């Protein structure tokens, strides 16, 4: 029963996202590429696979994190954070969560073992809104976990029911935004691009040239400015993708991450 409910919920979300992004990409295309591109079927499978198993895979690391925080972080701090107004907790959680995810993402590029998992996301040579879903489940678990650590350590997210709502709000905002930043749209948003991540910001993250390994932030480009990884010129990347090979079929994309490639 739960499985069919989850599949239906994901299908409704997918329909809503497609209804939004397919027309946008048709009318405002940054690059000429088919709406139904080569990797689209694989990416749809990733969408449902990750949508179904991510929360299951995240459950025990988050439970361990919550238990560790209860033992290690003073209760007074946890209570003080829990007593902050919701709007302040949401803003603080977005900023701190983005800092954690920034470093999780950056390590996924800089540490070869993690890159084996994360390179699945970077391998397509055509990028659009649906590319957002294309990721190894363990890559997503790692980055999400890194984003959650600061929320639990500071007491912004707590094991109590009221606190549990916050990671869900932060996660939902992050997920919807991450579809947008992958969209193949030619919009340039001026000064706003310095404040919040945009398609032009994230497409440079997918470049396959000397400027790769930039623009790690999910939401706040200022983090890349602070940590020295911002690249936001007026030009566009020549090509997307990775240097190494990536198997074409999804099962081998998942298993290659466990095998060292030289
Ligand atoms: Zn990346
Ligand atoms: Zn991406």
Image (spheres, rainbow, N blue to C red):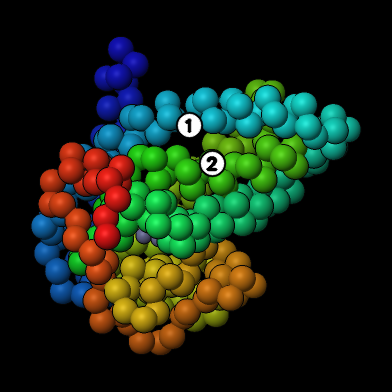
Q: Quadrant of residue 170?
A: top right
* Label 2 SS: helix
Q: Position of residue 81 (x, y in %)?
A: 80, 39
Q: Which residue is farthest right?
A: 76
83 vs 107, nearest the viewer: 107
Question: Quick one: label 2 or label 1, which is nearer the N terminus?
Answer: 1
Which residue is tagged 2?
145
Q: From the image, which quarter does the C terminus lie in?
A: bottom left
> How far apart are the alpha carbons under marks 2 and 1?
7 Å
Q: Position of residue 216 (x, y in %)?
A: 49, 64
Position of residue 145 relative to residue 91, above or below, is above
Of the four image quadrants, the one with ligand 1 is bottom left
Position of residue 90 relative to residue 60, above or below, is below
Q: From the image, which quarter does the N terminus lie in?
A: top left
Q: Quadrant of residue 103?
A: bottom right
Q: Specify whether 160 is left or right of 72.
A: left
Q: Is residue 27 visible to the viewer in this orientation of the structure?
A: yes
Q: Which residue is farthest top?
A: 1
Query: Contact, CB < 8 Å: mark 2 with mark 1?
Result: yes
Q: Specify whether 92 is left or right of 231.
A: right
């Amino acid at each position: 029963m739960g499985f069919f409910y989850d599949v239906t919920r994901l299908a409704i979300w997918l329909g809503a996202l497609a209804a939004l992004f397919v027309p946008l990409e048709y009318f405002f295309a940054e690059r000429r590429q088919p709406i139904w591109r080569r990797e689209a079927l694989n990416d749809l499978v990733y969408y449902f696979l990750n949508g179904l198993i991510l929360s299951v895979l995240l459950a025990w690391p988050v439970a361990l994190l919550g238990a560790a925080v209860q033992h290690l972080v003073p209760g007074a701090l946890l209570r003080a954070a829990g007593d902050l107004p919701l709007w302040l907790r949401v803003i603080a959680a977005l900023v701190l969560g983005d800092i954690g995810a920034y470093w999780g993402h950056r390590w996924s590029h800089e540490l070869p073992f993690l890159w084996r998992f994360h390179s699945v996301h970077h391998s397509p040579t055509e990028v659009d809104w649906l590319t957002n879903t294309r990721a190894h489940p363990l890559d997503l678990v790692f980055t999400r976990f890194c984003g959650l650590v600061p929320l639990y350590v500071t007491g912004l997210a707590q094991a109590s029911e009221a606190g549990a709502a916050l990671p869900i709000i932060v996660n939902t905002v992050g997920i919807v935004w991450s579809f947008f930043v992958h969209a193949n749209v030619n919009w340039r948003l001026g000064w706003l691009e310095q404040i919040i991540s945009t398609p032009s910001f994230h497409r440079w993250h997918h470049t396959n040239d000397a400027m790769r390994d930039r623009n790690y932030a999910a939401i706040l480009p200022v983090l890349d400015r602070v940590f020295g990884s911002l690249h936001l010129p007026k030009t566009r990347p020549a090509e997307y993708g990775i240097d190494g090979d990536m198997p074409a079929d999804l099962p081998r994309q998942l298993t290659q991450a466990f095998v060292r490639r030289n």
